[in-house]
Amino acid sequence: MNEAHGVAVHVETCGKTFADGTRALEPVTLDAARGETLVFLGPSGCGKTTILRIIAGLEQPDPGGRVLFNGADVTGVPIEQRNVGMVFQSYALFPNMNVAENIGYGMKIRGVGRAERQARVTELVRITGIEGLERRRTDQLSGGQRQRVALARAVAVQPSVLLLDEPLTALDAALRERLRWELDRLLRTLGITTIYVTHDQAEAMALGDRVVVMRKGAIAQIGTPRDIYFTPADRFVAEFVGAANLVEAPASRGTLSLPGGQLAIADVNAMGNIVAMIRPESIRVVAPGASRLSGRVERVSFVGDRQRLTVSGATQRPLLIDGSNTLAVKVGEQIGLDVEPSAVRIFPGNNT
Amino acid sequence: MRNRLIFAGQFVFTLAVAAFLIVPAILSMVAGVTANYFRGVRSGLTLQWVMQVWELYAETIARSFAVAFVTLGVTLSVGIPAAYALHVRGGRLSRAIEEIITLPLAVPGLAIALGLLLTYGGFGDFRRSWLFIVVGHIVFTLPFMVRSVMAVFSLIDIKTLDESASSLGASPWRRFRDVIVPNAHSGILAGSLMVVTLSLGEFNLTWMLHTPLTKTLPVGLADSYASMRLEVASAYTLVFFVMIIPLLVAMQILADRDVRQGTRR
């Protein structure tokens, strides 16, 4: 039912150096397939917004960079002729127009007749769940309503590609979570090629078909949400996406030697000092004698749906463990730790 | 104690405003309708001085309004796009241009007028026409328009609104018409108010640029002070007030309505 819409986006060696010489983006090359949601994830200043603006046509890439929509070079095409739909972090709704006029503006520009425009606006307010607000002024809307108007306005023109620049950042946490699901449902329904920029890893995971993790103007990793979570390319990705224990220790014959004992790893060929990543939720708490690795509970913090333990003595730095919320452990207790070998991700030792 | 000090301060301020602004203005206007100023109001009230002013200077009044509104037209059609360009562009060049057009605020009007005369005094027809005065007024008032429009632009993040309209397919001209101007109208209105009042009251630049056939209202006023009975000059002041106050009030009402809309936003 969800037919793919829009264009395939190809970004080719697009870098960006600003007039003052600052390098905002190293030359990057990547693809977004037709109908795909590609999420750019990274801390502020990593170049993710710059790449979005290059795809939109609001910034020109440095010489040599090209942007292609369905194989056609649009690098020199101004934004108003690229047929994109864009949602800004501040939403940028036009204060001089009411909700319906905002949503209909793109169609008005394209010369769509009044009746057809009205029909489309009616459809869009229904899809985005803002019926009854058509005559409101934009300053009479809540944050969540504004976000929906901005989204409806962007998709009203049936754009080739939908570009979303941190569309949920301006909202409070509870609303953000709810709108994330709504947005996901809407993007699936529309099936349009979507470029989404965020610094929130949970948002990136929930919405992206693929996630591009960025760091200091370059791509750190491209992959599905599962790829980047379970097999991060390096320490930066591991630590930026979710919580991670990074353990540095000597390895030989499929075993890591740690201060608190031994830990089996899947890679039997790993030798010498290596860096291993273990997610907090993949460590199981067992009886002290039931495992080759043990440690002492330093801190127990109960957060409702789970408990986070801080355990010392097992590894050089304290180890974070997520356990079930019914787990009965006390501070100072000695516990055994069990990890599936496949859940230990090995980075080369010199990769810091 | 402190409250008393504040009250005393406000009282003194009010008295000063009355003494130096309101009382002289009223006295001057009354003098304009007094039969004989030296004998005071007892000599009787008359409209003969006003009539005389009207006969002698009606054309300066008309010219002043013509100058003011042509000046307004030009500062609107040049100033708003200029403010838009300067704001959206940003950067060092924009700053420099902004400084240059703001220069007439710091340079004495006489100096600007002298410069214009030196440069264009040779173009006889232009020099003799009232358009020469318009040019001077535009140079003098443009920074006020540009500044007040730019102030609104930075208040409402016009750059993102502009980008947002462009993403929806609007050409630069459509964006300017549909989004920029309607959302900057409070600044445009404030700028217009300033330009019209400054132009109507402008004296020192105009005094240098005028010819006997292109007097404006304030120049005529100076002329009547210098060469007529005091009552005539006062009547002129009265005419000036009658002309300009309704205009000021009207524009103020418009601006207030706008502010009320703005706060609801």
Image (spheres, rainbow, N blue to C red):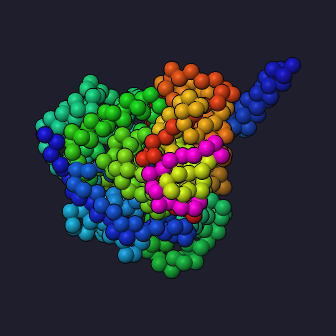
Which residue extends farthest right? Answer: B1
Q: Residue at x 40, y 40 (%)?
A: A203
Which residue extends farthest bottom? Answer: B122
Q: Nearer the viewer, residue B157 or A126?
A: A126
Residue B112 to residue B219: above or below: below
Residue A263 at least partly seen: yes
Whole-percent x and y of residue A62?
A: 42, 72
Tell me the quarter of the picture where residue A101 sits. Answer: top left
Tell me the quarter of the picture where residue B116 sits. Answer: bottom right
Q: How many marks?
A: 0
Q: Nearer the viewer, residue B16 or B63?
A: B16
Q: Which residue range is magenta in the image?
A: A259-274
Residue B165 at least partly seen: no
On whether residue A123 falls in the magenta region, the answer is no
Q: Residue at x 53, y 64 (%)?
A: B91
Residue A302 to residue B60: above or below: above
Q: Residue at x 33, y 28 (%)?
A: A136
Whole-percent x and y of residue A118?
A: 17, 35
Left or right: A219, with B40 as reference point = left
Whole-percent x and y of residue A259?
A: 65, 46
Q: Residue at x 59, y 73 (%)?
A: B115
Whole-percent x and y of residue B207?
A: 60, 62
Q: Nearer the viewer, residue B140 or A199?
A: A199
Q: Nearer the viewer, residue B48 or B54?
A: B54
Quarter containing the C terminus of chain B: top left
Quarter containing the N terminus of chain B: top right
